[in-house]
Image (spheres, rainbow, N blue to C red):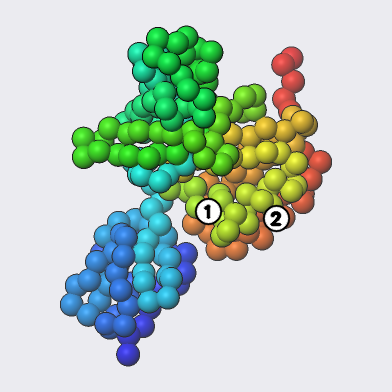
Amino acid sequence: MGEIVVKEKDVVVPGETLATGMDFLPSFGTYREGDKILASRLGLVNVEGKVIKLVPLSGVYHPKRGDTIIGFVREILLAGWRVDTNSAYSAVLGLKDASPEFIARGADLTKYFEIGDYIMAKIINVTSQNLVDLTLNGPGLRKLTGGRKIMVNANKVPRIIGKQGSMVSMIKDFTNCRILVGQNGVVWISGEDPAKELLAVETIKKIERESHLSGLTDAIKAFLEQHKDGITVPSDN
């Protein structure tokens, strides 16, 4: 009989034994050596049924088809916009994917998006040369106006969102803020109360710092309850 020799959410290092026997299957960040499953990188243990994988604790974002990201327009092209993806690879938003209405070639594209605008977009293609295509055709995909943006480690995004959105929903409920989390590690936060907005920011940063700890949900709930009236916004004086 095989057994798992580590606990869920344990932090493990390369070469560490995670399970013995042939009852379990290696997945991302793990590999089999004989009848053992070992870690191939630093990460957080995640067990789903018989599958063992690691959630990376560090690393940079690499665009993947189907990801929903938050990017900003950094260049206006002849037939679209070049968008920063918070990675080594920029993306292109073409005319047909930018708006449900027809945009003719030669139109003034600044009427739609200007340099510096942030957008919530979906990656629809990544070529073998890492050319990335985006679309805004889909629910929730749009230009983001106002609010503030923060950067987090893209590998911590699942912890910030939580299972079925539980963690980010809790933050929204306590702060009354609108929060969008891009899979590329860019987070957009918008609230009516600057103190509550700052609380949302600090809570997300806390999750990023402490994502490897057990009991994180309870710790975050306690933090939000402690600061339920918001965090004091520093004055300009």
Query: For the residues carrying marks 2 and 1, which lies nearer the camera in this image?
Result: 1
In the picture of the structure, the residue carrying the numbered disc 1 is 159
Question: Contact, CB < 8 Å: mark 2 with mark 1?
Answer: no
Could you say where residue 210 lies in the image, as x and y percent from the top left?
A: 54, 52
The residue lying at 38 percent from left, 53 percent from top is 56
Q: Within 10 angstroms of label 2, few (less than 14), some, or many (20 or more) residues?
A: some
The residue lying at 39 percent from left, 25 percent from top is 94
The residue lying at 41 percent from left, 51 percent from top is 57
Q: Is residue 153 above or below residue 76?
A: below
Q: Is label 2 in a helix, a strand or a loop?
A: helix
C-alpha gap between disc 2 and disc 1: 14 Å
Q: Quadrant of residue 204?
A: top right
Q: Quadrant of residue 60?
A: top left
Could you say where residue 54 lies in the image, as x and y percent from the top left?
A: 37, 61
Give the side of residue 190 with respect to residue 100, left or right.
right
Give the side of residue 151 with respect to residue 61, left or right.
right
Mark 2: amino acid: Lys
Of pointers 2 and 1, the one earlier in the residue sequence? 1
Q: Is label 1 in a helix, a strand or a loop?
A: helix
In the picture of the structure, the residue carrying the numbered disc 2 is 221
Q: Which quarter of the figure is the N terminus placed in?
A: bottom left
Could you say where residue 61 lies in the image, as x and y percent from the top left?
A: 37, 40
